[in-house]
Image (spheres, rainbow, N blue to C red):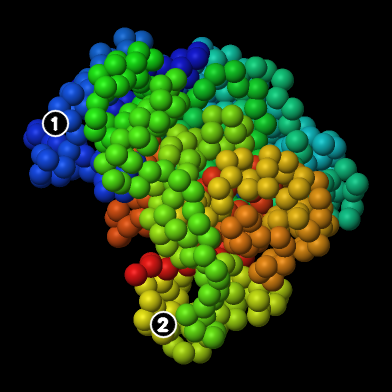
Amino acid sequence: MKRTGSVGAGFSVATRQAKMPTRQTEFCVSPGGLGKLQEVQRPAACLSPVARLCLLTIVLIFIWPRPADADGERRVALVIGIGAYENVTRLVNPSRDAAAMSGTLRDLGFDVTEGIDLDLPQFTNKVREFGRKAAGADLALLFYAGHGIQVDNENWLLPTDAKLLDRLDLEYEAINADALLRAMENAKGRVLLLDACRDNPFREGFLSKGQTRSLSRGLARVNVENTGTLIAFATSPGAVADDGFSGGEANSPFTAALLANMSAPGLEIRQMLTRTRQHVIAATGGRQVPWENSSLVADIYLSGMPAAPLPESLDETFWKAIRDSRDPADFTVFLRRFPNSGFATEALRRYEVLAKVAGTEALGSATLLPASRDCPTCPEILQLTAGAFVMGASNGDESASDNERPAHRVQVAAFAMTRFPITFEEFDACVRAGGCSTRPGDNGWGRGLRPVINVSWHDAQAYAQWLSEQTGQNYRLPTETEWEYAARAGTTAPRFWGDDHAKACTYANVYDTTAAEVSSFGWKPHACSDGFSYTSPVGSLKHNPWGFGDMIGNVWQWVADCWTEDYSGATSAVALADRECGERVARGGSWLSDPSAARSSTRLRMDVADKDIHIGFRLARTLR
């Protein structure tokens, strides 16, 4: 059966397939205490009968099919790709971008009107046809890929036959971007996606470079006047976007990132665009930063709404059933399911009492052991004793993404971790010994004690294996849980130095006033200076309370875990849950991170093959 629902002005209909369980399963808590639920075969290791009954009730509420919404929403789209220009530079990818976008939007339930390589009359007719379809629609979406120019702070889109010999020709040979917005003005919700920020294609006439002051690079900022509108650009105002073909890609970086994220279920469109921006920044080395302007007053879900939240009464029902339990595992399940409940504090107290009585280790903080090395040229490590902390972002952290929540308390076994990110000096030793097959480039910034960059997840794994062979120890990438435990170092604020991101430059190499002087990105720098424009030698700034340096900033750091959309399904690491998963996690931010990214709970989704100038890693070591 299908389940449907809508938000706001009918902008989104979510469809899911739900199936009842076909076999009986018992759930238990993993040996680490507040761990993820696991299926087991031995009933003795599992929850008490009353807790199992409560958990079954919750499972049934989530998976039982709901009746479909009687009122379907109407979603229309116009997709235009223009590359076969007659008088200016041709583009290869717009037609591919448009074809791929049309297919994706049809799969998402849009009535799609498509136009490829249109001259002016054809372009005008398509916009007119779309305007009629958009009238009264719940959502109208328009995607354009092709040449766009900014003249006198206005944006113009070019059909195939545009010549533009003088300023007056703009009115008769090009399409003003405002006309696209007017075509959608009678829809309830409006989305305009412009992959049209490429460089000036004209080499002669009044738009040739140097011939007019009215022409500017890229497209101009567009102020959204009508409520319920979102406009997204391939890059920031005044900047130029990449077509992608010069690198052999089938789509532009912006369109490729849109296609990779649009079909992800449960993402509100602004979340989807945030992920798109992350992908484009990674793909272009920070040269291209997508940007949007919005007056939306309701959520838009292109590929289905997120799972329905638990009814408010369920935490009370569950609590009443377990509050007199003598089994600490019952309270771990409660804390996992209801981390923000009014009963959570008492549940944690009950767990600690029962765990202590049972002879298990109660929740506590780590004890830092002295730094050491396993060989003279090995990276310096710090050993941490077992402890516990609250992982993820609190509800009060306005900079956090949904993938950082819910916050949840976890236990961590004793382990060791390198004090700093692995340096070029350390990684180059692996290359010279034949343990690492690729010698990564340093982007001209220098090697030595700077953190190694341009390394993939597989490169990090190769170094860990080589170091393990050299030392006889078990080096590996840390789990997300281990990484955040060490990064927070017993603190609970978004950053281990506190809530004031202006103090970042004392502790972290981030995007600041120094970096902004040489690298112009589309986000606001930290209001301080750390003295470094790019990466810095490790340990250049103050370490965190447990002695770890560069935990936040300098380079994003690969961890072992497969990517998960949030923390709702597990309270401990899901590292290597799928050894073949193609998407892993990076933590910590980098030298180009703004204040919203330079936090202890920030997570970045990365393909295992990705290599970039802001990605490195550090290692954990299993203690014997």
Is the residue marked by circle 1 packed among few (<14), some (14-19), or many (20+) residues within 10 Å? few
Q: To which quarter of the image does residue 568 belong?
A: top left
Q: Residue at x 27, y 36 (%)?
A: 329
Q: Which residue is mark 1?
A: 21
Dot 1 or dot 2: first in sequence order is: 1
Q: On the image, numbered disc 2 is attached to which residue? A: 471
Residue 438 vs 81, above or below: the answer is below
**Camera sees residue 563:** no
| Depth check, front residue: 407 or 364 | 364
The percent coordinates of residue 434 (x first, y second) are 44, 88
Q: CA distance from mark 1 to mark 2?
A: 48 Å
Asked if marks 1 and 2 touch (Cβ < 8 Å), the reply is no
Given residues 606 and 576, the one toward you in this image is 576
Other residues around mark 2 within 10 Å, as few (<14) / some (14–19) / many (≥20) = few
Provide the secondary structure element on which disc 1 rests.
loop
Residue 180 in the image: x percent, y percent?
Answer: 64, 27
Drawn side of residue 598 relative to residue 337, left or right: right
Residue 29 vs residue 592, the one in the foreground: 29
Residue in the picture at 29% in, 16% down:
320
Q: Give the residue drawn at x 54%, y 33%.
A: 394
User: Horizontal and vertical percent for residue 342?
Assistant: 44, 20
Nearer to us: label 1 or label 2: 2
